[in-house]
Amino acid sequence: MELSVQGLLESVGISLLSEWDVLAFVYRHGVSLTSIGQIAIFVGYENNVVARALDRLEREKLIERSRPSQEVCFYRISASLDAERQQRLHQLLSQSEGRAGRRLLAQRQAPVWSESGREEQSAESRR
Amino acid sequence: MSDGGPVKTGIQGLDSILLDGIPRTNVILVQGVTGSGKTLLGLEFIYHGIVQYNEPGLIVVFETSPDKLIRDAAEFGWRLDEMQQQKKLQIIFTSPQVFDQELRTPDSLLLETASEMGAKRIFVDGFGLLVPDSGGGNSMRGGYRELLQQLMESLSRENLTAMLSLEIGGAPSSIATVDATAFLADTVIQLGRGRHGRRVRRSLEVLKSRGQDFEAGEHTLQITSGRGLEIFRRVQAPLRTNAKQPTSSTMRSVIGVEAVDTLIGGGIFDGSTTMVVGVSGVGKTVLATQILREGALKQKTRGLLVSLDEHPAQIIRNAQTLGLNLEQQVSDGTIQILFESPQELDVDAHYARIVRLIEKHDIQRMVIDGMTSYSTAIGEVSVYRDFFHAIVAYSKQRLMTTFFNYENPEFLGISSYMPDFPVSSIVDNLILMSLVEINNSLHRCISVVKSRGSRHSFDTREFVIGQGGISLVPLEKNLVPALPLQSYSSLLSRAPTRFSLPKRINGAVAVQEKE
């Protein structure tokens, strides 16, 4: 299971726990009309962490967002996600529903806490 | 896609209560306590809009996860996920704050989406989350009122018919704002969920609806697994169409026994109502079976037996022991049996089922076996009375001949036809079936005490139940090894008294004396 989680994370293109949490939020809420601040409240990170996660997920073509209106956008899982990545994403989500799977995910993407105690660094900067 | 005319909800029974739907672009507030069916009503409103009327829709949720909404809807066979793929539906998860902001902004993404997909309906689940809490004071409430006005204006501009669900029964401090919502909404539908004995009863009432008339009062709401909501019009409501009541001068045999027809004045009029009153075990159900068989076999009329007392299998078996092959008529559909448990009876739904069966099978002769069980099951005398009146009115409108069996609690002789439910004046005919004790033996008797429009007999006749059902004991040739019935007086007053033989004094017949 451990190996498969690692492999799945890499193939989907996730490197941080915050990215995973934001991706899972977007996936589980279908189409959400919300702001970065609102997502931050839901997932429990600071606004700038969520903003970076959203930017990366969008760059990786994992999510789509609409034009902003008063800092609010529509967020949804990318419709152009290829079948293979979509399948892996589903597998990850399915595994993350169990406690063991979630722990593995957390271990694989252990965050490096900032002074504020909530911000994490990217995987690149940790190396 | 329909642009004109009222918006039909498509929910079973609701559009007829709304007299064909709700005026387009009305803001509909659905308020009720937890578990009353608000979310389901909204979901079904959107679902039927898409499926039946080709009107795309939006669902806005604050608390519920869209996944769960899709999962729950699938339980009723509504594939919301497929509708989303077809771009006929969009479920949007947002927060009350964002929703509030969206409605105030001129470039609203929400309304833009509605416009792009050609949405005609929108359901906002959990509108109460937009209601400011008690700490808000008048200024907050003023803001809320403003928000509502903006919402209504925006939705109307987009030609959207909105349904908002609002939970009530929570903090009393929110009453003022809830009232404001109800005041500003065009249509207010209140859902109820309460205890009836130990079971739960759901209800629906249209409190107001601008621009239309509707059936007022509390109707029954049921949630059926795999089907969704069903609203049953309250049974006492008079029919809107005040059509003339048809009458008939055709008389038909009751059970195919000439002597019984003679008692009742030659037969029974089509479209008449008859109450059969008798103690338990006197043979009311046997009479009911014969009434229906007579209709089905000889008069080619379809029959319906409604029972709260006996399961159809038991009714068929009991009839079989008397040589009455009811199974044959049930199999070929000429007789229908509707059995419902009195413990779970909901009178509005029950009435609707009876009406559906009558209309589906073109029933012309009906027996309701066990009015007493209705009294026990319904509990409230006024509801019981309404049910009875509705059945009588409906029967007459259809020119259907209807019999009601009523179990009189008095064992020997009766002092009142219907002690707990005096409606004998409403029916056209009244038949008494009594037990009489003669020589330590119980005898069955039948009398007709009322038959409108005919010259019925006031004779009390003895009858027996045997192979073939009920038959009258011949007057001349008594089968009972005792004195004939005519030898007794005061049979109905619980004191049968035998007449003595006439005495002859000097060749003349003296006045009869009692022994």
Image: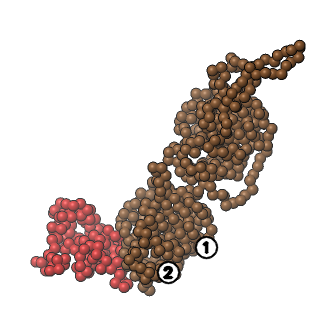
Chain colours: A red, B brown
Using the image, name the chain to which the residue with label 1 belongs. Answer: B
Q: Is residue A64 left or right of residue B435?
A: left
Q: Is residue A91 left or right of residue B354?
A: left
Mark 1 belongs to which amino acid? Gly
Element type at mark 2: helix
Q: Which of the marked residues, 2 or 1, is nearer the chain's N terminus?
A: 2
Task: Give whichever of A102, A4 is nearer the camera.
Answer: A102
* Residue displayed at 19% across by 77% down: A118
Q: Is residue A67 left or right of residue B459?
A: left
Mark 2 belongs to which amino acid? Gln
Q: Which mark is residue B149?
A: 2
Q: Which mark is residue B185?
A: none
Q: Residues within 10 Å of mark 2 (few under 14, many from 20)?
A: some
Using the image, name the chain to which the residue with label 2 belongs. Answer: B
Looking at the image, can residue B187 be seen? yes
Q: Position of residue B428 (x, y in %)?
A: 73, 44
* Residue displayed at 26% across by 73% down: A43
Where B229 falls versus B511 (above or below)?
A: below
State the image quarter where residue B187 is shown: bottom right
* Residue displayed at 69% across by 60% down: B241
Q: Which mark is residue B211?
A: 1
Q: Position of residue B162 (x, y in %)?
A: 50, 73
Q: Position of residue B54 (x, y in %)?
A: 52, 69
Where B255 falls versus B244 (above or below)?
A: above
Image quadrant in which the C terminus of chain B is located: top right
State the image quarter where residue B237 is shown: bottom right
Where B158 falls versus B71 (above or below)?
A: below
Element type at mark 1: loop
Image quadrant in which the N terminus of chain B is located: bottom right
Between the residue at mark 2 and the residue at mark 1, the CA separation in whole angstroms equals: 18 Å
